[in-house]
Amino acid sequence: MVKLINISNDGDVAVRSIPFKSIALEVLQILLQLIPMGHVTTYKALADLMGVHPRYVGVLIRGNKSPIVVPCHRVVKSDGSLGGYTFNGLSNVEFKRKVLEVEGVRVVNRRVPKEYILSKLIN
């Protein structure tokens, strides 16, 4: 749980607790929106920005209720391999590959070449 403290203009203090996963999911959704079409980033790059383990990024991405709109398909493993992808409750890495290629990302032998991978989203 994360504690949020709100102090009003009148000096009243309100404290509320929010589950960490809720905040992490919101932060991740914002970061995913920063990945431009035609590029990808890695689970590790996102994890480094968020201060979490790359596998936790994968757990959060699996909970994405709006694939395509929130472009989780633009996240790959550090070695460029596609990683997983679930669409409509079904594992479908081939769909991920097709969407990336439509967006201008080349995929060779199920890997994205380094020139398409953004290792840093924020300088």
Image (tube, rainbow, N blue to C red):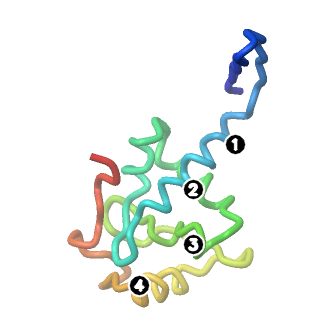
Q: Name the N-terminal-most of marks 1 and 3.
A: 1
CA distance separating discs 3 and 4: 16 Å
What's the residue type where badge 1 is placed? Answer: Ser
Q: Name the N-terminal-most of marks 3 and 2.
A: 2
Residues at discs 2 and 4 in contact (Cβ within 8 Å) = no
Residue labelled with disc 2 = 29
Please name the residue shown 34% across and 72% down the image. Answer: 39
Quadrant where the N terminus sits is top right
Q: Position of residue 61 (x, y in %)?
A: 59, 59
Residues at discs 3 and 2 in contact (Cβ within 8 Å) = no
User: Is residue 107 visible in this depiction of the protein?
Assistant: no
- The total of numbered circles placed on residues is 4
Please name the residue shown 49% across and 62% down the image. Answer: 33
Q: Position of residue 68 (x, y in %)?
A: 58, 76
CA distance separating discs 3 and 2: 16 Å
Q: Which mark is residue 22?
A: 1
Q: Is residue 75 above or below residue 49?
A: below
Q: Residues within 10 Å of mark 3 (few under 14, many from 20)?
A: many
* The furthest residue to the front: 10
User: Is residue 64 visible in this depiction of the protein?
Assistant: yes
What's the residue type where badge 4 is placed? Answer: Glu
> Element type at marker 1?
helix
Q: Name the N-terminal-most of marks 2 and 4.
A: 2
Residues at discs 1 and 2 in contact (Cβ within 8 Å) = no
What's the residue type where badge 3 is placed? Answer: Tyr
> Element type at marker 4?
loop
Residue labelled with disc 4 = 103
> Element type at marker 3?
loop
Q: Quadrant of residue 21?
A: top right
CA distance separating discs 1 and 4: 29 Å
52 left or right of 86 in image = left
Q: Position of residue 6 (x, y in %)?
A: 70, 21
